[in-house]
């Protein structure tokens, strides 16, 4: 039998859905590793001792660390999950690449600037590590079905895609939508973007500034335009029964606009975050 890949998680969180926090995406990474016969989750790092301890209990880990660099040096993992807030992604991905990890599964958004993203890509290119940014929602069956229908020509030529995300911002939620645009359009390159953000309230989420409202147009190769609106003014976004109630879960709709039709065609309603996430390769 071949040896299993050794995985570690940086950033455990408090316990995920149903507990104190909604997310704690580190638990999703842990569950995904647990489901794979090819991977063994060997350790986790978190600055918060209680979070690390609870995580170790959940996943039966013998070792946890307060210092992720110490973990990388001692464990020499094959796979590293980076599940901390975005301002930490660049330094952690670079450290993971430098430690010799073969695969790095970094939470979205990838980084807070293009400079950080470039440094992450450079580090991975240098070390030969595969970097994956976790846009797992493209694997939801409803998006796969929409992609199949579009590819089969079932709705004709797509002209525009629209999405609105109520009460969320581009970095914390919108990157999933932009990833879905590319997924539905067969990974077409985006040639240019025109966007305006309103950030007058200096709102912060996940340790960084986010906008209060965005209007953006993404021009994809072949002439398809993706429109995205985020923030407080997205009208009439209803609650999602799959997701429970509350402000975190009033969110997004997505529409395709096809050639020869005067109206938008709603093909995608609400999405639900799956159990164990799979990763979207950048
Ligand atoms: N892909 C998705 O669908 C999805 C869903 C939710 C969140 N996310 C993303 O996941 C990331 C984390 O979000 P979350 O809600 O799980 O966060 P969280 O606050 O629940 O967990 C982050 C953990 O990181 C730990 N931490 C902070 N600094 C650290 C350090 N220097 N070393 C080690 N651990 C450290 C914290 O103590 C905390 O336990 C964000 O980028 C978020 O956008 C993605």
Image (cartoon, grey):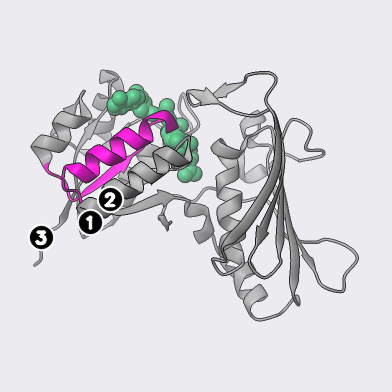
Q: Give the residue at mark 3.
A: 3
Q: Is residue 230 visible?
A: no
Question: Viewer-proximal residue, 103 or 146?
Answer: 103
Q: Is residue 101 visible?
A: yes
**Quarter of the figure with the C terminus:** bottom left
Q: Give the residue at mark 2.
A: 124
Q: In the image, ligand 1 is in what quadrant?
A: top left
User: Mark 1 vs mark 3: which is more N-terminal?
Assistant: 3
Task: Tell me the distance, in whole angstroms, between the alpha carbons under discs 2 and 3.
Answer: 23 Å
Please report the bounds of the magenta region as a residue range.
76-102
User: Mark 2 vs mark 3: which is more N-terminal?
Assistant: 3
Rendering coords of residue 60 (x, y %): 19, 38
Question: Viewer-proximal residue, 150 or 51?
Answer: 150
Rendering coords of residue 132 (x, y %): 37, 53
Task: Tell me the distance, in whole angstroms, between the alpha carbons under discs 1 and 3.
Answer: 20 Å
Task: Tell me the distance, in whole angstroms, between the alpha carbons under discs 1 and 2.
Answer: 6 Å
Label 2 neighbourhood size at 10 Å, few (<14), some (14-19), many (20+)? many
Judged from the image, the secondary structure of the residue bearing numbered disc 2 is helix
Rendering coords of residue 260 (x, y %): 87, 74
Label 3 neighbourhood size at 10 Å, few (<14), some (14-19), many (20+)? few
Q: Residue at x 55, y 36 (%)?
A: 172
Direction from residue 92 to residue 151 in the image, left or right: right
Q: Quadrant of residue 162?
A: bottom right
Q: Is residue 113 shown above or below 179?
A: above
For residue 77: magenta?
Answer: yes
Q: Residue at x 62, y 35 (%)?
A: 169
**Quarter of the figure with the N terminus:** bottom left
Q: Give the residue at mark 1.
A: 128
Q: Residue furthest bottom?
A: 152
Judged from the image, the secondary structure of the residue bearing numbered disc 1 is loop
Q: Is residue 111 shown above or below 139?
A: above
**Mark 1 Cβ and ligand 1 under 8 Å apart:** no
């Amino acid at each position: 039998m071949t040896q299993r890949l050794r995985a570690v998680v940086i950033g455990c969180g408090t316990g995920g859905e149903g507990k104190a926090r909604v997310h704690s995406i580190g638990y999703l990474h842990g569950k995904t590793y647990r489901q794979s016969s090819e991977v063994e989750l060997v350790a986790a790092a978190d600055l918060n001792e209680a979070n690390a301890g609870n995580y170790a209990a959940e996943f039966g880990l013998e070792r946890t660390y307060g210092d992720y660099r110490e973990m990388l040096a001692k464990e020499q993992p094959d796979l590293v999950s980076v599940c901390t807030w975005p301002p930490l992604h660049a330094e952690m991905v670079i450290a993971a690449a430098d430690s010799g990890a073969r695969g790095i599964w970094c939470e979205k958004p990838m980084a807070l600037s293009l400079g950080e993203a470039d440094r992450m890509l450079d580090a991975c290119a240098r070390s030969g590590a595969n970097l994956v940014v976790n846009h797992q929602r493209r694997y939801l069956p409803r998006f796969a079905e929409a992609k199949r229908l579009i590819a089969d020509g079932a709705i004709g030529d797509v002209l525009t895609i629209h999405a609105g995300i109520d009460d969320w911002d581009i970095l914390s939620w919108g990157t999933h939508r932009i990833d879905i645009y590319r997924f539905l359009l067969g990974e077409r390159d985006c040639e240019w973007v025109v966007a305006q953000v309103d950030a007058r309230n200096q709102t912060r989420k996940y340790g960084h500034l986010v906008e209060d409202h965005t209007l953006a147009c993404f021009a994809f190769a072949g002439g398809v335009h993706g429109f995205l609106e985020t923030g407080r003014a997205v009208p009439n976004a209803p609650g999602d029964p799959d997701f429970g109630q509350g402000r975190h879960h009033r969110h997004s709709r997505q529409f395709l606009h096809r050639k020869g039709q005067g109206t938008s065609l709603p093909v995608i309603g609400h999405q639900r975050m799956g159990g164990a996430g799979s990763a979207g390769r950048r």
